[in-house]
Every structure is written in C-alpha cells, then in structure tokens.
Image (cartoon, rainbow, N blue to C red):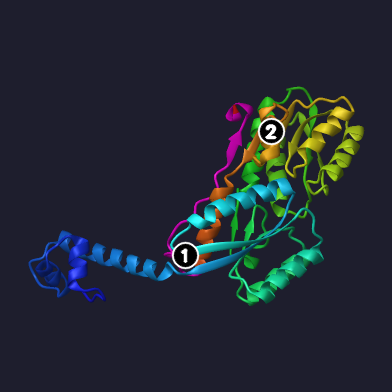
Amino acid sequence: MASKFTIKEIAHQAGLSLATVDRVLHGRAHVRALTRERVEAATEELARQHAASHLRGAKVTLDIVMQAPDRFSSAVRAAFEAELPLIRPATFRARFHLAEVMEEREVVALLRAIARRGTQGIVLKAPATPGIADCLADLAVRKIPVVTYVTDVAAPLRLAYVGMRNERAGATAAHLLGRMAPQHPSRVLITLSSREFEGEEARRIGFARYLAQNAPHLAMTTVSEGFGVNRATGALIGQALETYPDIACVYSIGGGNRAILDAFAAVNRSIDVFAAHDLDRTNAELLKSGQVSFVIHHSFRQDARQVSLHFSKHYRLIEPHVQIEDTEIGIACPISLT
C-alpha cells in the first residue's frame, strides 16, 4: 500500500505501532483485516487534513444580485453576512447588488459588468426572461458559475438552485389555508410580484393544483406585476376587490402585505385566512399581531450555507460526494412569536 505520508504520521493517526503500520504498508502476512482498515482510514483522514491545510488560504468572492423588495433582500443580506464568515476551510466574501425593481436590460448590464470586473460566482434572484437567459448562457461559456436563489432558470444555465421546492411550498400553503377557510363557496386571492419569477409561478401552480383537488368550493383569482412594492400592489388589490366581492382569503406569494391589508380595510372587507411567504421583519410583525394567519418560510442562513457548499464543490474545495440537502419548509403561526 503506497502512501505519501510517513509511517510515523500514519502510526500516530491510527494509534498503532510503527512496526504494525510498516507490515500493512508493505503487504506482509499476519496482519488482521481490522488493522488494515485502521491504517486505510488513518491515511484517508491525513489526506483530508492535508487538503484542508492548503485550502485555508483560499478566498472565494461572490456577487449576490437580487431583485426583491428591500424588506426581503435586507433579511437575506443580514443572514449571508452572518453565515459566510463561519464557512470553512475557504473564506467566502460577498458583494451585494440589490434593487427592488430592475428592468431586464438593467439586470443584463449588471451581470455583464460583474463578469468584466471578475467574479468567482454569482448568486442570482431575477426574472427568467429571454434576455437574462441569453446573458446567463454567455456567462456559462465564460465559465462563471451561477447559483439561482429562490426563483430558478433553465437548469443548463446555472450551477444549482438554492431555496425551497416552490411547488411543494405552494401545496403546503394550500393544505393549511384549505383547512382554515370557510367551508362555503368563496374565493382566494393569489398575489404574485411578477409571473416572470419562476419560483413564484411554481408556488402558484402547486397551490392551485392542491386547492382544486382538495377544496373545490374555493375559487381562485391571481393578480401580479406589483413587484412586492406597496403602492403598486395596493392598486392591484383594490381592483380585484371591486371585481370579486366573494374574496375571503389571501395567499400572498409576492409580498406587499401591509398594502394588501390596507386595501381590504379601505373597502371595509375582512380576510378569513391570510397566508404569506418569508419571515422578514414586516411579516413577523403582522403575524404577531394576528393580521397574517401563517407564514411559509425557510432559513436564509441555511441558504447561505447551501450556496457556499455548491461553490465549494464547483471549485473542488470539498469532496464531490458531499450531499447538499433540500431547503426545509418552515411554517410560522402567531403562537410561534409569542
């Protein structure tokens, strides 16, 4: 058994004598199978330690590009800034590029500027538009890895996706809302920030499928393109309330929840069940006050760890067989915060 480590190093790691390790390495007789396994395990552990020692000085700089309401992106930024310094053995650093609303050309221009300046990876939350897809194809040719966050793009255009399985998250919301909603016929208002966010559309599909099968007395109406911004979202909700007098519940995928509540209050309408996404500061306050019924959420810090694992595997900083688990879907209700 050939080894790049000395007999003394292996003997110390395995807790065996020099003579025993020598017999194993030279394939001599009268060595128990268990002893050979201990020497093999010690050699593998030394190899891992050796690799880690070379990686301690490695630095990976990521550019995090997010189109999202400030309440969401601020929570994500705080989580990433708290978690990335803890990642080992390499050092991860992040540069943040955050905006509430960006046109396609602005996202593309930003991605191309990042590529020109140089980056070791991009974390992207943006709409899956044709122009952005073309830009991501160019980045792939230039060997710039992209991890999509919360909302996805076509698989060939990115290294990995990090976030909840969105269709399952939507079905989870439908299961809870269907049990809490009145049993007489009424309507659920589904709100998206934009249909161009694939993650939000997947949540809507999962919600609608589950509700149609399990609570057919609940009709559904979708409004979108408010981008989670309060003023635009409030106007859309006001129009929906004028059109549909039977709206009794809300499934807010795209945010702008204070505006939604204000729009209902403006016409003296109540909400029987209000389901929301993401446990940011605003939703935590609304949940604690009982204005939101429950929140589907996930750990942003877990997301940061998963992002670092994907880039670590890409740059061979960790073993390729390391498994990266799916993001856990959490459910928060008012009692969770009391």
Mark 2 — residue?
285
Q: Amino acid at mark 2?
A: Glu
Q: Taking 302 as reference, is 182 left or right?
A: right
What kind of element bears circle 1? loop
Q: Residue at x 58, y 53 (%)?
A: 80
Taking depth in this image into account, of 337 and 203 the one nearest to the observer is 337
Which range is magenta?
A: 315-337
Identify the mark nearer the N-term, 1 or 2. Answer: 1
For label 1, count other residues whose C-alpha is less than 10 Å away and answer few (under 14), some (14-19) or many (20+): many
For residue 197, which quarter of the picture?
A: bottom right
Q: Residue furthest left?
A: 30
Taking depth in this image into account, of 222 and 46 the one nearest to the observer is 46
Q: Is residue 26 above or below residue 44?
A: below
Res 45 seen here: yes
Q: Residue at x 62, y 44 (%)?
A: 168
Q: Which mark is residue 90?
A: 1
Q: Is residue 91 above or below residue 142?
A: above
Q: CA distance from mark 1 to mark 2?
A: 37 Å
Q: Taking 297 as reference, is 218 left or right?
A: right
Q: Position of residue 214 (x, y in %)?
A: 67, 32
Asked if residue 333 lies in the magenta stretch, the reply is: yes
For label 2, count other residues whose C-alpha is less than 10 Å away and answer few (under 14), some (14-19) or many (20+): some
Rendered-image quadrant of the N terminus: bottom left
Q: Amino acid at mark 1?
A: Ala
